[in-house]
Image (tube, rainbow, N blue to C red):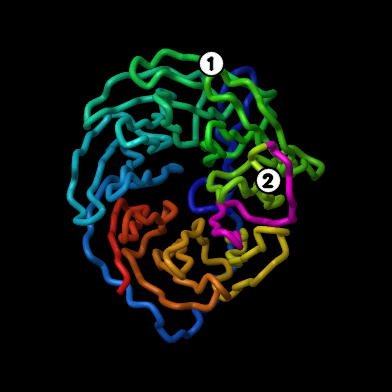
């Protein structure tokens, strides 16, 4: 079920948070790695370190730089060309979610439920949140937006930390302990509330539209969980998103109209281009769907049960990391294996990102590596 806390849910009862994690059942044996002929030359160009990454963190790409964090409290802005620090800060608090940035301000949420904002490597303000957050803050338009686990979206003034508004939906007893949807599309704030995607006015938090992406199914609270998953694909007006273990869907974000929905069993985010969207299912099948109508285009099942990350498009390749620390490069047109690299042997715990021409990969151990293709 996921690279982090895949079988962990957060239970809301009497205003208290209780983390409820079932024991991990016997996992299916990963598929034997297929033989392949390398068709892509990928070179390691630098490496760096942060602390261990065990919470649902993400990497913010800022031109030729990347901002990232460790669960232990390290926050760094790194030059993706060289791997050198632009600045580095230790918050002295464990980090639960982040990093969000607009290039000027950087925001994370601590495990003490504090929203922390940084400028030029220096903390400028903190705000206490009423609930945990597992979703990276969104920094945009001079504001910092947060999605908390009790299904509340909040906006703060980026300079002062003053709370500007809050929009809350009724919270189900269980929510996923992983990042949800909080993103920008033009002048609309996209927020996932359970199985629905809402387009909010970022100035006041009022809804502009609301669309159903995944419907609740099952006979118990766990089976009915349909939270939307961080990692959506935007192309023009088309926004494609995944509902946890339920479906993938594409919408017209200008009016919130669902264009198509297709059943899917994944728990990681999507990637996409103008014609297709891509994702890893929970059994690590990699799939491509038509962006226009949702029809399956290809399926790559040679990596089953390897615990794949959300994929990244890099030129003509689709890149995903796995729980054994391997990087898999697949052809975007048919899913054929192009290349495979070993990192440090620990899980690729964050979706890989592309900063300029540099592929940046973060392992659970805190190893950060830059790669380039020839």
CB contact under 8 Å: marks 2 and 1: no
- Does 34 sit above or below residue 77? below
Relative side of 46 to 267, left or right: left
Q: Earlier in the sequence, mark 2 or mark 1?
A: 1
Residue on which the image places disc 2: 251
270 vs 92, nearest the viewer: 270
Measuring from the top left, give residue 275's x and y in whole percent.
Answer: 60, 62
- Does 52 sit above or below residue 200? below
Measuring from the top left, give residue 91's x and y in whole percent.
Answer: 27, 30
93 vs 273, nearest the viewer: 273
Tell me if mark 1 has few (under 14), some (14-19) or many (20+) residues whose alpha carbon lies within 10 angstroms of its own. Answer: some
Relative side of 64 to 211, left or right: left
Q: Quadrant of residue 42?
A: bottom left
Relative side of 350 to 74, left or right: right
Tell me if mark 2 has few (under 14), some (14-19) or many (20+) residues whose alpha carbon lies within 10 angstroms of its own. Answer: many
267 vs 166, nearest the viewer: 166
The magenta stretch is: 255-277
Measuring from the top left, give residue 16's x and y in whole percent.
Answer: 57, 21
Instruction: Identify the residue at image location x=63%, y=32%.
Output: 199
Q: Quadrant of residue 299?
A: bottom right
Q: Quadrant of the C terminus?
A: bottom left
Instruction: Identify the residue at image location x=67%, y=24%.
Output: 169
**What number is the disc on residue 165?**
1
257 vs 34, nearest the viewer: 257
Judging from the image, what secondary structure is the residue with disc 1 in? strand
Judging from the image, what secondary structure is the residue with disc 2 in? strand
Tell me, yes or no, whether the highlighted magenta stretch contains residue 262: yes
Looking at this view, name the residue that lies furthest to the right: 219
């Amino acid at each position: 079920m996921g690279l982090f806390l895949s079988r962990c849910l957060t239970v809301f009862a009497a205003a208290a948070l209780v983390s409820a994690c079932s024991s991990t059942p016997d996992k299916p044996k990963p598929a034997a790695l297929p033989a392949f002929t390398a068709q892509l030359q990928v070179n390691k160009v630098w490496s760096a370190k942060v602390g261990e990454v065990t919470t649902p963190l993400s990497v913010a790409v800022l031109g030729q730089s990347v901002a990232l964090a460790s669960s232990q409290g390290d926050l760094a802005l790194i030059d993706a060309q060289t791997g050198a620090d632009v600045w580095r800060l230790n918050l002295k608090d464990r980090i639960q979610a982040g990093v969000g940035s607009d290039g000027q301000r950087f925001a994370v949420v601590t495990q003490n439920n504090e929203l922390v904002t940084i400028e030029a490597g220096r903390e400028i303000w903190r705000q206490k949140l009423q609930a945990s957050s597992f979703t990276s803050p969104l920094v945009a338009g001079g504001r910092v937006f947060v999605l908390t686990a009790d299904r509340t979206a909040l906006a703060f003034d980026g300079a002062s930390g003053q709370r500007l508004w809050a929009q809350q939906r009724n919270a189900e007893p269980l929510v996923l302990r992983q990042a949800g949807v909080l993103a920008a599309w033009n002048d609309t704030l996209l927020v996932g509330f359970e199985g629905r995607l809402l387009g909010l006015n970022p100035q006041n938090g009022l809804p502009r539209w609301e669309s159903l992406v995944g419907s609740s199914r099952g006979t118990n609270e766990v089976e009915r969980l349909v939270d939307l998953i961080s990692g959506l694909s935007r192309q023009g007006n088309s926004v494609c998103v995944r509902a946890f273990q339920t479906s993938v869907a594409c919408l017209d974000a200008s009016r919130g109209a669902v264009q198509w929905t297709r059943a899917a069993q994944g728990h990681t985010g999507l990637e996409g281009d103008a014609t297709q969207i891509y994702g890893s299912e929970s059994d690590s099948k990699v799939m491509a769907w038509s962006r226009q109508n949702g029809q399956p285009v290809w399926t790559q099942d040679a990596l089953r049960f390897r615990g794949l990350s959300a994929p990244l498009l890099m030129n003509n390749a689709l890149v995903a990391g796995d729980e054994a620390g391997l990087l898999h490069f697949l052809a975007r047109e048919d899913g054929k294996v192009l290349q495979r690299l070993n990192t440090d042997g620990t899980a690729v715990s964050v979706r890989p990102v592309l900063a300029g021409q540099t592929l940046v990969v973060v392992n659970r151990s805190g190893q950060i590596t830059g790669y380039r293709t020839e």
